[in-house]
């Protein structure tokens, strides 16, 4: 078993980018399933996903994990966004929610 060198939350787009560099013959079954999944369902360019994540962390003061959740789901309305942020158990101001939606729309 390989040693874990770094633990970091990454978006599904970034997963697709990383696994896309691996020879499919060298992937284990879980890696293949994961790559098949992200190949079917991910539509965001990895560069856009990384940029969106950085902006959400910097401008909206989200954690990396929260930003990745938003990048992966890309909610399109305030109600949908609130349903995700409710589970974070912290108050997100309406102004911040609007800023999150604006960042998502800039990367759509």
Image (cartoon, rainbow, N blue to C red):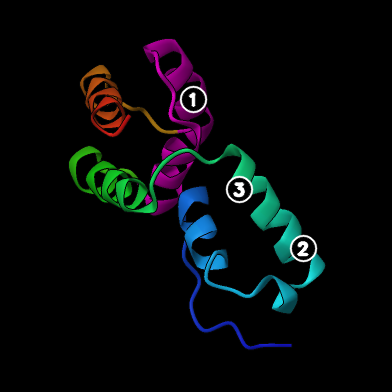
Q: Give whichever of 87, 56 is nearer the camera.
A: 56
**Image mark count:** 3
Main structural element of the magenta stretch: helix, strand or loop? helix
Q: Which residue is mark 1?
A: 86
User: Pointer 3 and pointer 1: residues touching (CB < 8 Å)?
Assistant: no
Q: Is residue 86 visible?
A: yes
Callout 1: SS: helix
Q: Is residue 87 magenta?
A: yes
At a point 53% along the width and 56% down the height, the residue shown is 16
User: Which numbered disc flags the more N-terminal residue, 2 or 1?
Assistant: 2
Q: Is residue 11 visible?
A: no
Residue 62, placed above or below residue 75? below
Q: Which residues are magenta?
A: 63-89
Q: Residues within 10 Å of mark 1 (few under 14, many from 20)?
A: few
At a point 71% along the width and 65% down the height, the residue shown is 31
Q: Residues within 10 Å of mark 2 (few under 14, many from 20)?
A: few
Q: Which residue is mark 3?
A: 38
In the image, residue 70 lies at what x, y percent? Answer: 43, 36
Identify the disc placed on residue 30.
Answer: 2
In the image, residue 17 lies at what x, y percent? Answer: 48, 60
Q: Nearer the viewer, mark 3 or mark 1?
A: 3
Callout 3: SS: helix
Callout 2: SS: helix
């Amino acid at each position: 078993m390989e040693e874990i060198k770094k633990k970091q939350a990454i978006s599904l787009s970034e997963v697709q980018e990383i696994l896309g560099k691996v020879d499919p013959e060298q992937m284990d079954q879980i890696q293949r399933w994961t790559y098949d999944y992200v190949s079917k369902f991910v539509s965001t360019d990895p560069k856009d996903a990384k940029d969106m994540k950085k902006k959400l962390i910097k401008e909206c003061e989200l954690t990396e994990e929260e930003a990745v959740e938003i990048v992966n789901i890309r909610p399109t309305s305030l109600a949908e966004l609130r349903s995700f942020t409710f589970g974070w158990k912290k108050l997100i101001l309406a102004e911040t929610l609007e800023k999150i939606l604006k960042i998502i729309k800039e990367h759509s």
